[in-house]
Amino acid sequence: MTQLADLSDSELKAYHRRVSEAYQAFSGRGLSLNMARGKPAPEQLDLSESLLEKPGVGNHQASDGTDCRNYGGLQGLAELRSVFAPMLGAKPEQVIASGNASLSLMHDYIVFSLLKGNPDSDRPWGDAPVKFLCPVPGYDRHFAICEEFGIEMVNVALHKDGPDMDQVEALVRDDPSVKGIWCVPKYSNPTGAVYSDEVVRRMAAMPAAARDFRVFWDNAYAVHHLTEERVEIASLLEACEQAGNPNRALVFGSTSKITFAGAGIALFAGSAANVEWFQARMGKRTIGPDKVNQLRHVQLLPDERALHQLMDAHRQILAPKFRAVESTFDGLLSDPRVAHWTKPRGGYFVNLETPPGCAQRAVNLAKEAGLTMTPAGAAFPYGKDPEDVHIRVAPSFPSLQEVEQAAEGIALCVQLAAAEQAISERGL
Ligand SMILES: Cc1ncc(COP(=O)(O)O)c(C=O)c1O
């Protein structure tokens, strides 16, 4: 396969001329496209439209007789927790259903730990410097929580089957200020990595200098498959119990990309000690969750079969968009090979890797051509991609036609950025 480095000077100049013209033509189309955030498309939200008619007048009782209109029930409706417990690799009694954003639950677990310490802490985390390990590239909003509270972030390499566990084990074993690690264990944001059983086992069993070290297991894409294969991963909760570290696992999920992104249900699962501790803290800021929303979710999704059916319908909408991105990149970026990209089996993102030093330039070129991308570097702590290589592509929200146009646009920008760099390196 040809690389830019294989081209002669005159071939490189011709390539540069050709891609500049193609880029100019694309810019001239006056498009305005957005591939920046992984939001569900309107047609996906329509799949759960009947939620808006539920639970219906006079229909406000949970299975145990709870009047869902009233205060109370901090842990969330039992029948809802039963439907979603398997998705989290948990038992229903290990689950808390509260609020609409799992990000809030992650945020709160950290803030409560900083202020008060968690079940295994000798003192509040905030009494001393705190570090979190961040497999990269990763989810920018995780890193934003750390930045907000002055938690130092330490990059760890993320492979296809999870973080580099040799690196993780060494850092966690030796440094008591390392209190947490961010993990998106299935179809990770943005690389699509799926953690292997071996990574889960090592994560659960590794010795930690801090007794109150926690694994933030954000299983946001647990049922979000893009192929017919429903990829399964090992349960971190079970692995931690077996390894004698039951409180280490903090599992998060939500229905944000199952039902409504702005009006879904957020979920937490943990050991009995964590569930008790978290509820004790939560109980100071709320008398109970929105059980009416929980009730209508159970009516829409009474069991796992209904959940998988709904996710199949999401897949019918999403998979063609991902295929469009892949085939456009195959066509434009393979020969000469100027980039690499992931072909995820699930989740919401494609991770595009440019030659070193080109990602920022490509994203800027895209902006000038009317194409909004996630800022280069966003998938790294402090927004700094050390090699300036990664671009997160989010094909879910735009229409299929827009995705096709946007994928072509970003590929042209990568071609041009790579060609410019090669020309300047050769002093042509
Ligand atoms: C890895 C990951 N976690 C969490 C979220 C947000 O979840 P929620 O809507 O439940 O706060 C997202 C959204 O993109 C995500 O990609």
Image (cartoon, rainbow, N blue to C red):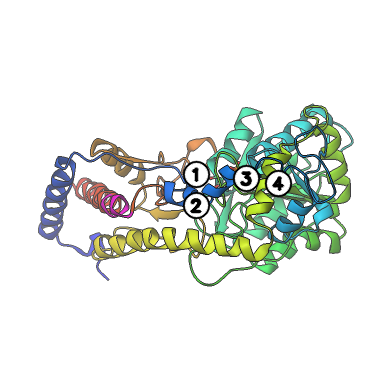
Residue under the point 27% across and 39% down: 32
Q: What's the residue type where badge 1 is placed? A: Ala
344 in the magenta segment: no
Q: Which residues are magenta?
A: 400-405
- Where is residue 50 shown, x and y percent of the image? 55, 49
Between marks 1 and 4 in the image, the one whose residue lies nearer the viewer: 4
The label on residue 295 is: 4
Q: Earlier in the sequence, mark 1 or mark 4?
A: 4
Circle 4 crowding by C-alpha within 10 Å: few under 14, some 14–19, many from 20: many
Determine the CA span between mark 4 and mark 2.
32 Å
Q: Quadrant of the N terminus?
A: bottom left
Q: Which residue is mark 3?
A: 54
Quadrant position of ligand 1: top right
Q: Residues within 10 Å of mark 1 (few under 14, many from 20)?
A: many
Q: Quadrant of residue 286?
A: top right
Asked whether the residues under the numbered discs 1 and 4 touch, taking CB atoms below 8 Å apart as contact, a structural biologist would say no
Look at 80% across and 55% down and name the residue there. 92
Residue under pointer 1: 379
Mark 2 or mark 1, earlier in chain: 2
Instruction: Kindly report the distance in space between the C-alpha atoms of the residues bearing marks 1 and 4.
Output: 36 Å
User: Marks 4/3: CA distance?
Assistant: 8 Å
Q: Residues within 10 Å of mark 3 (few under 14, many from 20)?
A: some
- Pair 4/2: label in front: 4
* Residues at marks 2 and 3, CA–CA distance in whole angstroms: 34 Å
Q: Please give left or right for residue 63 compared with residue 198 in the image.
A: right
Q: Secondary structure at mark 1?
A: loop
Counting residues from the start of the chain, the first of labels 4 and 3 encountered is 3
The residue labelled by disc 2 is 190
Earlier-in-chain disc, 3 versus 1: 3
